[in-house]
Amino acid sequence: MSRAFFALLLRDLRLAARLGGGGGMAVFFFLVVIAIVPLGVGPDRPLLASLAPGMLWVALLLAALLTLDRLFQADYEDGSLDLLSTGPLPLELVAVAKALAHWIVTGLPLVVSAPLLGVLLNLPSAAALPLTLAMLIGTPALSFLGSVGAALTVGIRRGGLLASLLVLPFYIPVLIFGVGAAAAASGGFEGEAGRQAFLLLGAVTLASFAVGPLAAAAALRANLR
């Protein structure tokens, strides 16, 4: 079973690398959003610095939403999803492999680019490491929660927008705790507030690991009947 899981994960990573567009499109959208924020807010550097963690998290969240329809739709259209549903791997593990591949292709490049794009918003150097760690902890939750919305809309043409609307309310805790963790830890990791924010963010991610694949698998079974 583990061999089938890693084979599916590697297959999705190869397809993403061959077809392109997923991670690159998300990073490009991330760049565009961050680049236009100073134009709207103005050249007030202290104001930009105070807004930087929140704006980076909001832009990352919106960029992650762009690629949700890539999780299951292509496999549904070419019949691969039907084969996966009858294969040796349970649909729950199929959902885990798909969500993990989505995070590697989309979430990880966004996390890496976030501190670099933070320069455009005058992100304080002390906040760069806490922000990166918070995104590294929180972004897997976006992929696992997003897999539920993608599974619910897998049979709907152009269901990407509907999937985004369905999962957006569940992204709010990740956004709140992510921004809170970065802000609380920017003055040092020894503070109690910083530790609590990171623990809460980790709890949300762990809950998404537990609930996301189960809900996604149930939605896939309903749509494949």
Image (cartoon, grey):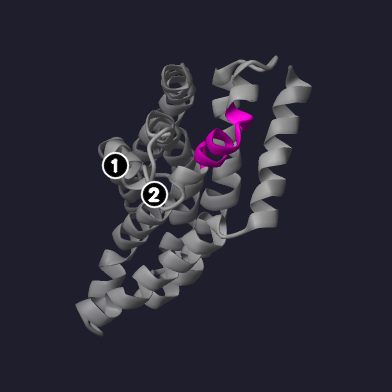
- Asked where in the image residue 45 lies, by quadrant, the reply is bottom left
Q: Residues within 10 Å of mark 2 (few under 14, many from 20)?
A: many
Q: Is residue 200 left or right of residue 28?
A: left
- The answer to whether one can see residue 152 in this image is yes
Measure the alpha-carbon separation of dots 2 and 1.
8 Å
* Dominant SS in magenta: helix
Q: Is the residue under label 1 in contact with that under label 2 (CB below 8 Å)?
A: yes
Secondary-structure class at tag 2: helix
Indicate left or right for 74 with 130 as reference: right
* 159 magenta-colored: no
Residue at 42%, 36% in the rendered image = 150
Q: Which mark is residue 65?
A: 2
The disc at residue 168 is: 1
Which is more toward the observer, 192 or 87? Answer: 87
In this orientation, which residue lies closer to the viewer: 126 or 110? 110
Give how far across and how far down residue 165 sits, in percent: 27, 42
Task: Name the residue type under label 2.
Answer: Leu
Mark 1 surroundings: few (<14), some (14-19) or many (≥20) residues within 10 A: some
Instruction: Using the image, determine if residue 180 lies above or below residue 141.
Output: below
Stretch in magenta: 71-81
User: What is the quadrant of residue 191 in the picture?
Assistant: top left
Q: Is residue 196 found left or right of 88 in the rendered image? A: left
Give the residue displayed 60% in from the left and 37% down from the top.
78
Q: Compared to 13, does 60 lie above or below?
A: below
The residue positioned 50% from the left and 70% from the top of the image is 116
Kind of element beneath mark 1: helix
Q: Quadrant of the N terminus?
A: top right
Residue at the location (43% across, 70% down)?
31
Identify the mark at residue 117; answer none if there is no mark: none
